[in-house]
Image (tube, rainbow, N blue to C red):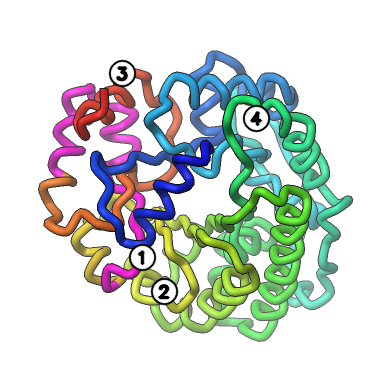
Amino acid sequence: MRQEQWDKLLAVINGEFVEPLPIGFIIDSPWLPGWTGISALDYYSSEQMWFEANLKAVQQFPQVIFMPGFWSEFGMCTEPSAFGSKCSWQENEMPYADKIITDIEQAGSLTKPNPKKDGLLPFTLNRLKHYQGQIEQQGHGIKFAVSRGPQNIASFLAGSTEFLMAIRTDPAEVHKLLGTITDFIIDWLELQIKTFPSIDGVFILDDIVGFLGEQDFKETALPYLQRIFKSFDVAIRFFHNDAAGLVCAPYLAEMGVNLFNFSFQHTLTEMKELTNNAVTLVGNIPTRDVLAAGSPDDVRKSVKAALNSVEDKSRIILSCGGGMPPEVPTENIEAFLSATGYK
């Protein structure tokens, strides 16, 4: 991310009106390999191909704020691998992390990983170390420490269905599990921040939060996310949940979040009301059906409809309701830009 883009993000978060409205997309391995014509496996296994794919995106669309920017990741395997999950890889699919907990009563014996040496985390950091100089030569900086959230990681370690059921059947064991994972996430983010002093933002992704009712959210998600975000004195605290976001929206400011990417199923107006306009919103056109599968005209219409739906256009980063999905073509990104006044 270029410094002027970071400054623009800060301005919007502080309530300043920026025109034209900033455009930002979360981009990573679901989209970049296919868009650049390489396999997913090459993207994960070749540092050079990873760098060139990210570089192509920022050079082709300099008007777009790509978040977090040169994201070093191994799909959903990144954090679960540190706990010992077996990671399965395919040529052109996202990798998958197998669960390691077969009975929720095992949660209490789970050992907190060391992010300096466990799983794929040292490779994640080294990739950025190796290319930090070239990233900076291109005018970009490493600005975010990134991790999947506690509920997301727990759902891989224990299985999504099993974890969600255990919230009701074995709450004590669930809290042990989430406590260990949260301690690990804080260590992992802290290591990233110490490694790259340019970091001034924390980015947490956790879609499982959207599957919870309000009481379960308040008991098993809110305190852990709050502890993570409030552990760091950084300028931007970014949360992504593109499952149902209504449950967490009223509590984002309490969590310490000031930037939120959410499901396209919720309108900008709805989210402004739920957050009391205290949180900058990243959205909000449909990801798969419009940005990926729609025509350029569909994209333009959707962007204009989103803009017309909200009177107060402060604290908005125009985007899609989630991360950039697979198979989004160049012409649709160009249509998104043109619909908001960019050339």
Observer-side mark, 1 or 3, equals 1
Q: Residues within 10 Å of mark 1 (few under 14, many from 20)?
A: many
Report the Cα–Cα distance between label 4 and label 2.
Answer: 32 Å
Q: Which circle's residue, 4 or 1, is located before the other in the chain? A: 4
Instruction: Please tell me whether mark 4 sits on a helix, a strand or a loop.
Output: helix
Instruction: Please tell me whether mark 2 sits on a helix, a strand or a loop.
Output: helix
Task: Reply above or below: 250 against 211.
Answer: below
Q: Quadrant of residue 288?
A: top left
Boundaries of the magenta span: 276-305
Observer-side mark, 3 or 4, equals 4
| Residue shown at the point (17%, 24%) measured from the top left | 297
Task: Reply above or below: 101 against 22.
Answer: below
Q: Residues within 10 Å of mark 2 (few under 14, many from 20)?
A: some
Which amino acid, by three-letter code, is at mark 1? Val
| Residue shown at the point (43%, 38%) measured from the top left | 65
Q: Which residue is mark 2?
A: 253
Task: Reply above or below: 288 against 334.
Answer: below
